[in-house]
Amino acid sequence: MKILGMPALWASTDAKAEFNGTVQGYADAMQDMAEAFKDDGLDRKPLREWPAIPEPQPHISGNLPTMTSQEFWEKGQRKGCRKAYLDILKLEANPIVIDSQVKGKPIKVKINGKVSLRGAWVSTKGEAGVKVVDFVREDLRKKGKSYPVS
């Protein structure tokens, strides 16, 4: 590779590191928030008695990045963590209504942020973050790419 192409390579590498960090940050945040709703006793309590949605923190060390790609990965971690939190807060403020069934009878169910986190915990058997990564991996596979992006 010629020296003139190096800046483009570096920019591409930085963008990939940031994307990978964003996915991981989003997944970690969803896992952390869903964990607050793991108690099966919540299913028998009114929503007003459920815990508050915890504000997740990025899973990064306090050490200074030693490489530029690590710096971009951490930037992505922070971005993904914040996006997951804001997505859940938006859903909490503006619930959606979905069609469901109980004993074969159609019903409408209101899904807010807390209910979605409880559903994520239950439906993934406590592996909400893993499921987020699986969704991204599948979406990229359909586009002929893989995760983590390299």
Image (tube, rainbow, N blue to C red):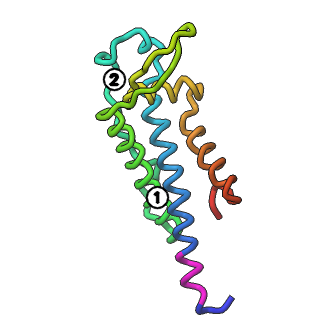
Q: Which residue is mark 1?
A: 76
Tell me the tag on residue 22: none
Depth check: 48 or 109 in front?
109
Q: Residues within 10 Å of mark 1 (few under 14, many from 20)?
A: many
Residue 56 spot, x, y in % from top left:
39, 41
Report the quarter where the N terminus lies: bottom right
Alpha carbon separation for disc pair 1 and 2: 28 Å
Asked if the residue at tag 2 contacts the one at tag 1, i.e. Cβ–Cβ closer than 8 Å, the answer is no
- What type is the residue that disc 1 sits on? Gly
Foreground residue among 55 and 47: 47
- Image coords of residue 94 (percent x, y): 31, 34
Query: As displayed, is residue 56 above or below residue 21?
Result: above
Q: Helix or strand or loop: what does disc 1 sit on?
A: helix
Highlighted range, magenta: 5-11
Is the residue 123 above or below the residue 8 in the image? Answer: above
Residue that mark 2 sits on: 51
Query: Which residue is painted at 50% across and 71% down in the image?
Result: 68
Indicate the position of residue 62 as horizontal and vertical percent values. Answer: 41, 55
* Secondary-structure class at tag 2: loop
| Vertical side of 37 occupied by 141: above or below | below
Inspect the magenta stretch and tell me whether residue 9 lies in it.
yes
The overriding secondary structure of the stretch rendered in magenta is helix
Residue in the image at 68% along x and 53% along y = 142
Residue 76 is a magenta residue: no
Q: Is residue 62 left or right of residue 148?
A: left
Which image quarter is the C terminus in? Answer: bottom right
Residue that appears at 44% across and 51% down: 80
- Say whether residue 86 is left or right of residue 26: left
